[in-house]
Every structure is written in C-alpha cells, then in structure tokens.
Amino acid sequence: MFKISKAGLQAGVKKLSTQLMLLLLIVGIVAFIVMYVWQSVQIKAMQAEYQQKLVAYAAVQERNGLLQDHLDFYNSPGYMLYVEKVAREALGMVRPGDTVILTVPDKNPDGSTAPGSPKSGSEVAQVTTHHKPSWQNWLSFFWGH
C-alpha cells in the first residue's frame, strides 16, 4: 500500500491551496474586468440617451417659446382691437346694446322718391339691433327658420 507521509501530505495540501488561491485570484480579476467593461458600456449608452433627451428638450423649449410668442400676440390689446375692427367692418357685426344707424336713400335707383323716406338727405333712421344667440343664427342659416 501507499504510505503518505505527513510532510508529503502537507506539501500536497499547500500546493493545492496555492493553486486554488491563484485560480480564485484569476477568476476575481476576470470578473472585475467583465464588470468594468459592462459598466462602461452602460455609461456610454446612458450618455447617448441623455444627449438625445437634451436635443429633444431643446426642441420642445423652442416650440414652447414660439407658442408663447403667438399666445402673447393673440392676447395683446392691439390684436383684440384689430379683430373687433374686422368684425365690425368686414362682417357687419355689432356689440350687444350698440345702436346701428342706417342711412335711407332719398331716391330709388330709377330716380323716384323712396316711400317713407325723409325729405332731406341729412336725416337718418335709427335702428336698434336685437342679437340672437349664435346657435339660432346657425339654425337659421342651415334650415331657414
């Protein structure tokens, strides 16, 4: 039979222990390198995503600025006066309670005097407008009520 001496056994255990420690050290270094590379790749991906988000944010900020400029313009008193002027002149609209004054022609196009017209051209007829709500105007437009 084989007889193993105590000294030989201790040398074998020491050799095995050294090899095991060396193997664990190599595995630890490889794991560290793999984790370092993986973290580096993750950081690069996050930086690229961050740059994309910055570009998108800048575009949204620019669009928001343009929309705010438009909103400020449309809410300005000058624009409101312009809208009122166009509504009055081009569309013939009046504010509720306004009095509309219409001139009555002295003569018809054929030269005869219009019935019920005042004798002088300086006199005018005064008409008070009564506004219907918008929905009634649309109803009248589409169905002729």
Image: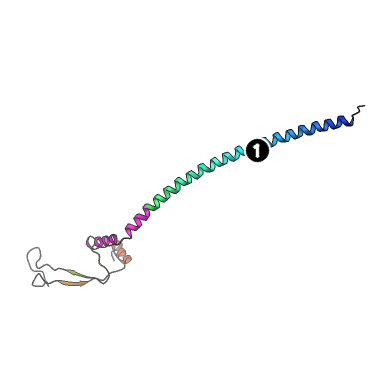
For residue 51, side relative to residue 92 (left or right): right
The quadrant holding residue 144 is bottom left
The quadrant holding residue 7 is top right
Residue to which mark 1 is pinned: 32
Q: Is residue 67 above or below residue 118?
A: above
Residue located 81% across and 32% down the image: 14
The spot of residue 99 in percent (x, y) is: 22, 71
Q: Nearer the viewer, residue 78 or 125?
A: 78
The spot of residue 67 in percent (x, y) is: 37, 54
The spot of residue 97 in percent (x, y) is: 26, 72
Q: Residues within 10 Å of mark 1 (few under 14, many from 20)?
A: few
Residue located 24% across and 62% down the image: 85
Residue located 63% across and 37% down the image: 34
SS for tag 1? Answer: helix
For residue 102, side relative to residue 69 (left or right): left
Bounds of the magenta span?
66-90
